Image (cartoon, rainbow, N blue to C red):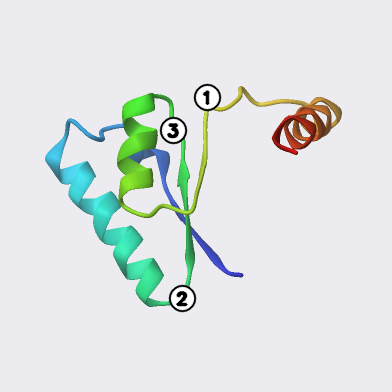
Amino acid sequence: MKRLKIDQSFIRGIPDRADDAAIASSIIVMAHSLGLQVLGEGAETEEQRRFLEERGCDEMQGYLFSKPLPAKQAEDLLKKQTVMNS
């Protein structure tokens, strides 16, 4: 599936900055209407995560979930999460 990323510069200001919130919300609606999944890039707070989730953002990445990791550590983290969610 094709994916559209919302740049972290827009995520950083939500939910407090009305213009960033409007842009992020509009991107999600537009992308979904085009059959694209949406990835919110740079989520750092629970408020940002909740805002994006409530508006239907399909995926998120950012320091809220994990700092950048070397490939092996990222693989180990994903394996651990898979086991925990099983």
Q: Is residue 45 above or below residue 55?
A: above
Q: Residues within 10 Å of mark 1 (few under 14, many from 20)?
A: few
> Among all residues in the image, which is located at the extreme left?
18
Q: Nearer the viewer, residue 82 or 35?
A: 82
The residue beneath circle 2 is 35
- Quadrant containing the N terminus in the rendered view: bottom right
**Residue at figure coordinates x 61%, y 24% from the top left:** 66
Disc marking residue 63:
1
Res 61 → quadrant: top right
- Pointers 1 and 3 in contact (C-beta within 8 Å): yes
The residue beneath circle 3 is 43
The residue type indicated by label 3 comes to Ala
**Residue at figure coordinates x 31%, y 28% from the top left:** 47
Q: Is residue 31 above or below residue 68?
A: below
**Residue at figure coordinates x 73%, y 29% from the top left:** 84
Res 40 → quadrant: top left
